[in-house]
Image (spheres, rainbow, N blue to C red):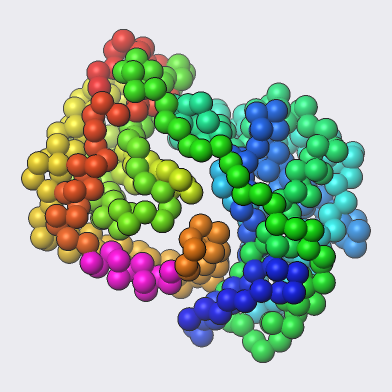
Amino acid sequence: MFEQYQLKNNARVLLVPQTDTRSVTVLIMYPVGSRFETDKMAGVSHYIEHLMFKGTKKRKNTLTLTREIDRLGAEYNAFTSKEYTGYYIKVDSAFTDTALDILSDMLFHSTFDPKEMEREKGPIVEELRMYRDNPMMNIENIFEDLMYAGCPLGRDIGGTPETVMSFKRDEVLAFRDKFYTASNMTIVVAGKIDGRTKEKIVEYFGEEKNSGKPSSVFKPAIFGSREKSKRLAIQKKQTDQVQLMLGWPGFHYTSKENPSVAIMSAILGGSMSSRLFIQIRERRGLAYHIKSDDEHFRDTGHVFIRAGLEAKNINKAIHVIGQEVEKLITKGVTARELADAKTHIHGSLILSLEDSSTQASWYGKEALFDTRIRTPEERLAEINAVTQDDVQAAAKRVFHMNETRVGIIGDVDKEAVAF
């Protein structure tokens, strides 16, 4: 079980003890990401994440800060999404104090040195180029820009080279100060927790003053045009393999439909025995990689299928995908498929939760997105309650072919794609 409480400055704390590990993960999360940014400041959340590693009043530069973590053999990093930003250090539990100290120092006392801020723009631009030059990484950007055309959810999390290079220090600090407040912080400690952990959390995080909770207002999600010609996006690129992604509007993070959709996705393309894997790869040899999954945000979501294949096989693959989707809608799933999908999801989740970092991530996201924190066991109970009728109903709600969005990266012409 987990324990949840608040510090005097309203920072939220979650303790997730594990008895079968020697590691501890300290994860700090803020409910801010790229969808909270203006067009002018696109990418600033990601930029701030990078700058937190550039030195504090106590640890003057990157080398001093990272060397202190590296000497512990720790795992550490940060991440920015469209709706949240996180910072974590995973260590031997003997070094929990050090992890708490370093993270609090970074988040409360980073100096944001003007020279470092300018210098870091270069690596971020190169990071953007790296992703955009890699079709397997960039296909999600192409697809989501199409799916959510006209709202911030469709933008690249990192912004553009132009927006990154235009950031002004005072604007960046104003954005940071708006969202990086104690009352907007969730502190998760998972793993081997001892009796001193609580007092150390107070020592390192409880003394920071609360400057008020920022508004969580963001532009509502909107989907792109339903006009067929505007539901296809192609990035023309000379590649040996085309990246293909199809998707449909789905459900928000707390939707009651999600357990049914998770099972539907598992049956359709979640494993090597899934329908799409067998039909696309094994029976026809059209692709090496094929999968289906779903993505959730605060107010919306989508279901997607993606594959890597030769350009000449795009229409064949889309046709087979359409056939399999139609079977889900008209015939549903078998009792064996349902049972196998449930045990597949159960096994995958249980194995992943042996890691303290996965435990921390689970509870951190639940704390940010839901009014009530569900334990993994509660999530599995929801999965176990899904019926064959529930899965078929979910397929009927999701798969409207006049809502299909298609994103492609490769040497393909629009007029050649049939969907």
Residue 377 part of the magenta-drawn span: yes
Identify the magenta region. 374-385
The outermost residue toward the bottom is: 195
Return the residue nearer the eye: 6 or 73.
6
Give the main secondary structure of the magenta stretch: helix
Screen quadrant of the C terminus: top left
Residue 319 drawn at (x, y percent): 19, 27
Residue 282 drawn at (x, y percent): 18, 41
Residue drawn at x 34%, y 15% as measured from the top left:
229
Residue drawn at x 16%, y 49% as measured from the top left:
392
Q: In the displayed structure, would residue 7 be above or below residue 115?
A: below
Q: How many marks?
A: 0
Residue drawn at x 23%, y 67% as measured from the top left:
385
Return the residue nearer the eye: 342 or 400.
400
Asked if residue 218 lies left or right of residue 99, the reply is left
Q: In the displayed structure, would residue 319 be above or below residue 31?
A: above
Residue drawn at x 36%, y 12% as measured from the top left:
413
Residue 58 drawn at (x, y percent): 90, 62
Residue 42 part of the magenta-drawn span: no
Q: In the displayed structure, would residue 359 be above or below residue 392?
A: below
Quick check: can you spot residue 241?
no
